[in-house]
Amino acid sequence: MSGRSRMPPHGMKGPPPPLHDVPPPPFGGRGRGPIHHASLLEEMRDGPPFGLRGNHAPHPAVIEERLAAQHQEIQGLLADNQRLAATHVALKQELDAAQHEIRRMSHAVANMQADKDLQLREARPMGELIQIRGDIQKLNAVRQELTGQVQALTQDLTRASADLQQAPAIKAEIEGIKQETQRVRLYS
């Protein structure tokens, strides 16, 4: 019965791991003293510190050996930290230089675009002027052709007007010929 209320065993000893890999404050917060290295904490969870088994203390050589190993590990971590800091500084400098170069290139591209736009604006009127001159020549040719057509139509209209003015006389002449033809028939 008592087994029913028990929580399932954890897969590890000690408290659950932190949610984030944020290093703890150097003195553990709330004035509790310095925090020990993670490997020391693991050893403490597994048993008494520095291999204390039973009632007797470990041999000083074992303690010194462990301290030397920890010191060597700390020195390695310090060297790694220094390398990472130097790499960080170098990368930051490279990033700053790259951003500066991007800004410089952006300004250069903007200046080149402005120059190109100015050249296009200056060239456009010349191109438009050439096109306008061509259009004027075409329109002059069309105007001359239309003027010729108007002159021809004016001449045709003048002839038609003259013919139209002669129509009553021609009509009277035709009428006279008809009457004379009828008289000739009557007398013949």
Image (cartoon, rainbow, N blue to C red):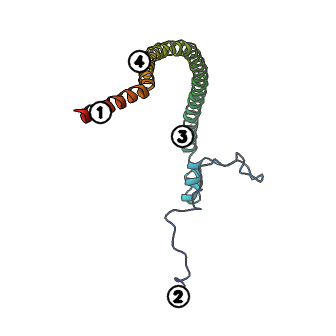
- Mark earlier in primary sequence (1, 2): 2
Q: Position of residue 105 (x, y in %)?
A: 57, 20
Q: Quadrant of residue 72?
A: top right
Residue 187 in sight from this viewpoint:
yes
For marks 4 and 1, give the CA distance: 45 Å
For marks 2 and 4, give the CA distance: 127 Å
Label 2 CA crowd tier, 10 Å (few <14, some 14–19, many 20+): few
Q: Which mark is residue 152?
A: 4
- According to the image, label 1 marks what residue? 183
Q: Secondary structure at mark 1?
A: helix
Asked if disc 2 and disc 4 are in contact, CB closer than 8 Å, the reply is no
Instruction: Give the residue type at disc 1.
Output: Arg
- According to the image, label 2 marks what residue? 1
Identified at 60% across, 25% down, the residue is: 99
- According to the image, label 3 marks what residue? 65
Q: Position of residue 64 (x, y in %)?
A: 57, 40
* 108 relative to 38, above or below: above
The C terminus, quarter of image = top left
Which of 32 and 124 lies nearest the eye of the viewer?
124
- Mark earlier in primary sequence (4, 1): 4
- Mark earlier in primary sequence (4, 3): 3
For marks 1 and 2, give the CA distance: 158 Å
* Residue 153 relative to residue 53: left or right: left
Asked if disc 4 and disc 1 are in contact, CB closer than 8 Å, the reply is no
Q: Position of residue 114 (x, y in %)?
A: 60, 18
Instruction: Give the residue type at disc 2.
Output: Met
- Mark earlier in primary sequence (3, 1): 3
Instruction: Give the residue type at disc 3.
Output: Glu
Label 4 CA crowd tier, 10 Å (few <14, some 14–19, many 20+): few
Q: Secondary structure at mark 2?
A: loop
